Amino acid sequence: MAVIHKTTLSPTKMELLAPWLPTQPWYVRTEREPELTRVGGFRLDDPQGEVGIEFMVVTDASGDRPVSYHVPVTYRGAPLDGAEQALIGTPEHGVLGQRWVYDGTHDPVLVAQLLAFFQGRAEAQAQSVSDTPDPTVARSFSGADLSGVAGPSAVTSGSYGTDVAVGSAQGGDPAGPLTIRVSRLLRPGQQEAPEPGATTARGHVAAGWRGPDGEENRGVFAVLYDTAP
């Protein structure tokens, strides 16, 4: 399991995200610079122990009302080939040295572990504590085995969030092409995704975050769909 180091990161995560968030199509624009606070999230482990995987929730208080965003990120010890457009920044970690921080929807390690989590082959971990599962993060899934599915083959963002296209690994896979829709704008009281089978959804991931007054909110972080032909 990943080790969470109690050390410094310079710039901090919020300092890295402040200039990056307003460049995203799903960001709700305000008249001021973002005022960010981390308010929730969870982690998944990289089986190889090389890549940090975090599903972070941050609240921006710069507008007329606070807005919470879901920001999946990965932390790497070297650049990810072909992912220059997804680079958020290169902070200095107090223990590990320079890190390359990416929008995780473009990172194949995060996508593979998210697919594994949908199926129950990976376990959600606490965001800030080492070796501690987080049972509050819920998942559902139905359909064929996803262990051979490869991706991301394409990543598309809009005001709705981010779609990550994944497909069959070499040699084919019964799962066929799939899309992970990653929620970006999290709304208090957001309803859970319908059970797989009720729509075209194969499964979903739901988790919680803290509201501006400390209240506990919960919503859908990602939904897995069959890609329309």
Image (cartoon, rainbow, N blue to C red):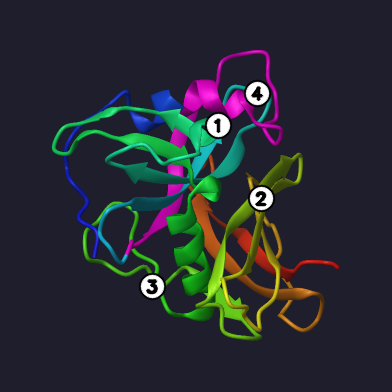
Q: Are marks 2 and 1 in contact (CB under 8 Å)?
A: no
The CA distance from mark 1 to mark 4 is 27 Å
Residue type of the residue flagged with mark 4: Gly
User: Quick check: 141 left or right of 177?
Assistant: left
Question: In the figure, 204 relative to 96: above or below?
Answer: below
The CA distance from mark 3 to mark 2 is 26 Å
Circle number at residue 85: 1
Could you classify mark 4 by the number of other residues whose Cα lies within 10 Å: few (under 14), some (14-19), or many (20 or more)? some
Residue 127's x, y, as percent? 34, 54
* Mark 4 residue element: loop
Residue of label 3: 123
User: Quick check: 215 left or right of 191?
Assistant: left
Residue of label 2: 154
Q: Quadrant of the C terminus?
A: bottom right
Task: Please identify, in this view, whether the residue under mark 4 or under mark 2 is nearer the observer.
Answer: 2
Q: Give the magenta part as a residue range.
A: 17-46
Residue shown at the point (34%, 27%) measured from the top left: 90
Q: How many numbered marks does the figure carry? A: 4
Q: Quadrant of the N terminus?
A: bottom left
Q: Earlier in the sequence, mark 1 or mark 3?
A: 1
Q: Earlier in the sequence, mark 3 or mark 2?
A: 3
Q: Are marks 4 and 3 in contact (CB under 8 Å)?
A: no
Residue of label 4: 63
Q: Is residue 19 magenta?
A: yes
